[in-house]
Image (spheres, rainbow, N blue to C red):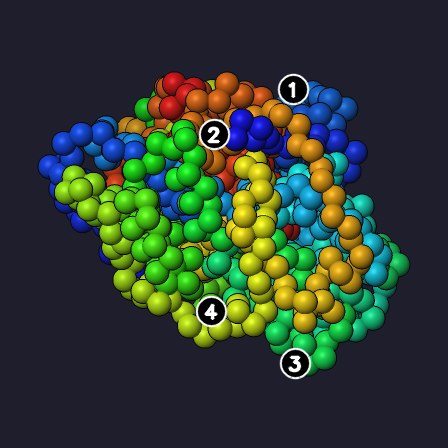
Amino acid sequence: MNSFTCPLPIRTKDRILLGHGSGGTLSAELMREIILPAFSNPILDCLDDQAVVNINGVRLAVTTDSFVVKPLFFRGGDIGSLSVHGTVNDLAMGGAKPLFLTVAFILEEGLSTETLRRVVDSLARAAQEAGVRVVTGDTKVVEKGSGDGLFINTTGIGVVADGVRLSANQAKPGDKVILSGSIGEHGITILAEREGIEFESPVGSDSAALHTLVADMLAAVQGIRCLRDPTRGGVSSTLNEIAQQSQVSVLLDERAIQVRPEVQGACELLGLDPLYVANEGKLIAIVDPADEAALLAAMRRHPLGARAATIGAVTAGHPGMVSMRTVLGTSRVVDMLAGDQLPRIC
Amino acid sequence: MKYIDEYRDPTVAEALVQKLAQQVTRPWVLMEICGGQTHTLMRYGIDELIPKQVEVVHGPGCPVCVTPLEIVDKAIEIASRPDVIFVSYGDMLRVPGSSSDLFRVKAQGGDVRIAYTPMEALKIARANPERKVVFFAIGFETTAPANAMTVWQARREGLKNFSLLVSHVLVPPAIRMLLDSPVNRVQGFIAPGHVCAVMGYRDYETLAAQYHVPFVVGGFEPVDLLEAISMLVAQLEEGRAEVENQYGRAVSRDGNQPAQHILEQVFETADRKWRGIGSIALSGWRLRPEFDDWNAEKVFGLSETDVPEPPECISAQVLQGLKKPVDCPAFCTRCSPETPLGAPMVSAEGACSAYYRYRRHLVTA
């Protein structure tokens, strides 16, 4: 019996794995070891969803994002609208008013022009609805087999008003954690459609541009420390990043986190935790407790924040750790995953 | 949600906790066998709720954890072949073999696909007649009927490009091994609900009678587990050693007979090596010889190998319930899900992984 043994770990790092794109600790490792050392500067090193640069007194927000979602069309959106919403939201999380987008398409040989037309129409409509203009772009075609139909990159430019300073390193013990609505809808929609999972899932992606909600929030209160949209890696990864960057702890209340029954059902069936499932139309706000009530009231007046709720608080113990008071009143860690729960969803 | 919410009800849980506190007069050591139950215990912090005299230790019921190194190496060898589409449950892709894992095979160009049911692999085989499609059939009695169904169906259809790489393990022989051990501490077992949903619980009645140890077939939600613990403590306090069924909404004494019928046609019992534990007599299933044409080990002519596992972690004691993951000096330091020293840290259902994910604040406090 004492000869029981265990395998050694495999630590070769010579290949990129899908998990490196998951938003979990493997992604963080890739950033830390390869990307950041090459480019390090004070603006990049803030590691926010957008960079804010000051040019002759104008505070410009800049962000970029690539979209590789499969399937290209899904209930509640498509790769075109998603590539507007994703970038607009990254600007909005810095408190910026989004103004301009660049759009680059990487097309795979053989893609039907009808598909491309539908995506472009959807992208144009989403940009118009969000009040941003596409001002430049690029198209490239790669050989069949070198891409997956269609990839899109968008870069966004916006302006940040004086006095607005939002960053993931500003959370303080005592602050409240507010979530704008129910979680997991985008990730479950993509998974169900991609895998052809045979349950009747009326759930659709929550993909939406959040900048008007953010504008209402910033107009209502002064005490917002940080805004983040919990996309890949879900609410858990986003809060872990905030906890690490601010060197604080976050304590969540499981009962306050809303999950629609269809999403809960799919998660139960597939063995997934909705806290790790991607959202594309939700935001998390860290706010001064004195402004909690006013902020919730302002959010609930906006359609995209109608179900906003306080889901937890920032505390001092265990810097960098997120934990949760469960429905049974016990506590548990809410960890950052190493790799994917679901492969490639946004 | 029906059948979920009522089994996570804080009021019901509180009442069970109070009942337990009144029942217990002395210390008891209980074991849950199934990794799914370990996960629930940790996720809901049930160890915080129950009286200190009741210690729950975690058994070897994570199928990913106990799949032997040799089989993982065989999977990697098959999946690396250009003529193969290798289909697996997602959790197996992360499990390290002796020199690689299936995620790395995929990154190096191997066609490795994740499925949610083995029937998807059969669909892939029908759609790709020029390729050989192999499904990695691992797990306990729970996953076996669906895996058996694939080869049964493949034979009926004459589908020749499909095969199974089988590494099925069985719960009752593992419990017998634990009870035979001179260092065993376990006094009562929560029997695995989903295994019993397939197999029924007559085998556990034999074990209860032979070893005078009580069993309660338990479900997977927090209220299920609290109720199962309470039923076990009641038996122990009263000196009974019976098999009781807490998970009546899914389990009957005789189990799922059509599933058992197909299992009998497709599989036969065989000795099986358990990772971290060693060989246990008649503790697994392999394909019957009449299914040789769908047996990946035969199709690809793989020979038996014996890969020595370097002595590194305490998973042996953890899988037997002799030690808790937090007792390991490497836990959270040299051993984590990104750098697993042992199998129980690899799978989401492994005891070490469950402690790491949900109870880490206990050691870093």
Badge 1 element:
loop
Q: Which residue is mark 1?
A: A42
Q: Which residue is mark 3?
A: B156
Give the alpha-carbon distance from disc 4 to disc 1, as whole Å: 64 Å
Quadrant in which residue B81 is drawn? bottom right
Instruction: Point out the frontmost of discs 2 and 1.
Output: 2
Instruction: Point out the frontmost of discs 3 and 1.
Output: 3
Q: Which residue is mark 2?
A: B317
Q: Chain of mark 2?
A: B
What residue is shown at x 32% (from left), y 24% (from top)?
A174
Badge 2 element:
helix
Percent coordinates x, y for residue B353 in the rendering? 49, 35
Q: Residues within 10 Å of mark 3 (few under 14, many from 20)?
A: few
The amino acid at mark 1 is: Pro
Instruction: Point out the frontmost of discs 4 and 1.
Output: 4
Q: Nearer the viewer, residue B295 or A250?
A: B295
